[in-house]
Amino acid sequence: MTDGETGAVTGTKDKDYNVIWFTEQCLSNVLRLETYVQDAERDGDTELAEFFRRAQAESRKGAEQGKALLKERFGR
């Protein structure tokens, strides 16, 4: 999915934008999955709640890695 935008319009190079987007999506996923955990718990489905908790942990891990990379690249 490319439209030829390489930073001229947004002011952010694609590779930088990609890391920012990835990090935001991981954080958004953590929040969305919290709702899914609560839904499963409300219905008494502990197996599904645990599944979503594991997915949430992986999304949180991805967000932390993305934040660390952004800090390394831009926080100098």
Image (cartoon, rainbow, N blue to C red):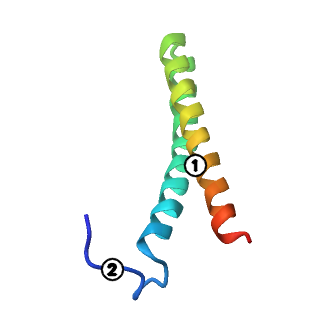
9 w.r.t. 52: above or below: below
* Location of residue 45 in the rendering, given as x and y in whole percent from the top left corner: 50, 12
- The part of the image, by quadrant, that contains residue 54 is top right
Front residue (pair 11, 51): 11
Left or right, 9 with respect to 41, comes to left
Instruction: Work out which residue is located at the far bottom of the displayed protein and give it.
Output: 8
**Can you tell which of label 2 and label 1 is closer to the viewer?**
2
Point 55% across, 54% down: residue: 23
Q: Does label 2 or label 1 sit earlier along the sequence?
A: 2
Alpha carbon distance from label 2 to label 1: 25 Å
Question: Circle 1 — which element?
Answer: helix
Q: Amino acid at mark 1?
A: Leu
Mark number, residue 27? 1
- The part of the image, by quadrant, that contains residue 6 is bottom left
Q: Quadrant of the N terminus?
A: bottom left
* Location of residue 58 in the rendering, given as x and y in whole percent from the top left corner: 55, 34
Q: Amino acid at mark 2?
A: Glu
Q: Quadrant of the C terminus?
A: bottom right
Question: Circle 2 — which element?
Answer: loop
Name the residue tied to disc 2: 5
* Location of residue 74 in the rendering, given as x and y in whole percent from the top left corner: 66, 71
Point 49% across, 52% down: residue: 25
* Location of residue 24 in the rendering, given as x and y in whole percent from the top left corner: 54, 56
37 w.r.t. 71: above or below: above
For disc 1, the neighbor class at 10 Å (few under 14, some 14 to 19, many from 20) is some
Front residue (pair 51, 23): 23
